[in-house]
Amino acid sequence: MRRTAWILIGFGVLLLILAAVLRFVVAPAATKLPSDTDTTTTYSGKGTVLNAAALQSGDVANALARDIPVTLDRHVYVSDSDSDTAIVHDDGTLKAGPSSSQSNHTYAVDRTTMTETDPINGIQVEQHHGLTVTLPVDPEPSSDVYTYWDTMTRKAVPVTYIGTEDRAGRTTYHYRATASGPLADPALQQQLPTSLPRTLAPRLLALLPTQTQQQLAPLVAALPAQVPLGYTATSTYDVWADADLGAPLDTKINRSVVANVLLGNNALPLLPVLAVDVTENQASVADAAAKADDAALKLDWIQLWGPLILLVLGLALIVVGLLIGRRKPEPPVAAPTGRVDAGSPAAT
C-alpha cells in the first residue's frame, strides 16, 4: 500500500510539473510569430496609375489611367527566425490593366511585440519602427498604444482604435493609421520621373483641376526647360485584427501619390500619379478567420485547458496517494496450527 501511495504521489507531482511547463514555457512560445508563417492576401478595387514612359514621350492622352480595376496580392512570410527574432517579408504585387509593379520589404521583427528589433547576423533588412504585418497576441483595444510603419513615407504613425466589430464570425478590433508626407519609398521613386520637359506643360494643364490651371498658367513661360518634380504620399490603413490573436482578418488600403511642380521653395500640386483604394477579398477574409479559429483553439488548450486538466489530475493523484499512505494496515490473520481435536469429524 505504501508503494502504491508513493507511485500515485509521484505521478501527481509529474503532472503538476507538466502543467507548469505547458503554461509557463510552452504557452509563451506559442504566442510568438510562427517561424513557418506564410500567407497570401488578395485585394481588389479601383486605382489611378501613371504610365511614366508615355508621359516622357509626350503622349499625354495615355499617360494617366484613371479609375481602372486594380488588384493587390500581398505575400507575407518568414524566411529566418531564432528564439526572439523573425525575418519577415512583405511583398506586394499591384496589377492595373496589363501593367504590374512590385513593392517588396524585409523587416527584422520581434516575435512577441511584432515591432522592430536587431536583425539576425548577415541578413539585410529595412530599418523601421512600429508594427508592420500583424499586431501582437491579445492586442490592446485603445488608441495611442501602437505605431504603424508606413512604407510610402518611411515613418511610424500613431494607430487609432475605432471599435469592436465582427469579421467572419470572430470578434475583431478595428484600427486605423494615416500617414502623409514626402514620398520616401526608394522603389516607387525609381518608377516616377524626376522632371518633365517644359513643352509638355500646356498639354498637361488641360488635365488639371481648374484651380491648379489658374495657378500654373501664369508660370509656364518662366519654367525651366526641365521642370523639377517632387512627390507627396498619403496613406490610410484600416485593419480588423483578431481580438485574441492580433492577426489581421480584414484590411482596407487607400494610397495616393501626387506629383508637385517644384518652384524654388514652393511645391504646387500637379496631378495624382498613383491612387489605390482596395479592400481585402471576402475569400481572403474567410480563410484568415478559419485559420484564426484553429490557432485560437490550440492556444486555449496550451494556455488554459491543458494546464488546468493536468493540474486537477495531478492534485487528485497526490490526494489519493496521501490518503492511501495514511491508512493503517489491517492486522494479519492468524494461520491455522494444523492440530486436530479428537472429537472433530477429521479425527475419525
Image: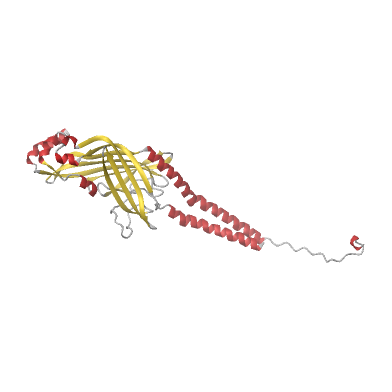
Residue 98 figure quarter: top left
Q: What residue appears at the point 26 percent right and 35 percent down from the top-left corner?
A: 68
Q: How is the image coloured?
A: secondary structure
Which is more toward the observer, 298 or 239?
A: 298
Q: What residue appears at the point 70 percent right and 62 percent down from the top-left corner?
A: 329
- Residue 208 seen: no
Residue 193 figure quarter: top left
- Point out residue 218 in the picture as x, y percentages from the top left corner: 9, 37
- Point out residue 346 in the picture as x, y percentages from the top left corner: 89, 61
- Residue 49 seen: yes
- Point out residue 26 in the picture as x, y percentages from the top left corner: 46, 55
Q: Is residue 3 left or right of residue 63?
A: right
Question: Which residue of the protein is positioned furthest toward the left in this rendering?
Answer: 221
Q: Is residue 323 above or below residue 286?
A: below
- Location of the C terminus by quadrant is bottom right
Q: Is residue 226 above or below residue 310?
A: above
- Point out residue 242 in the picture as x, y percentages from the top left corner: 40, 44
- Location of the N terminus by quadrant is bottom right
Q: Is residue 131 left or right of residue 28?
A: left
Which is more toward the observer, 67 or 243?
A: 67
Which is more toward the observer, 244 or 256?
A: 256
Q: Is residue 298 left or right of residue 335?
A: left
> How many labels sit on residues?
0
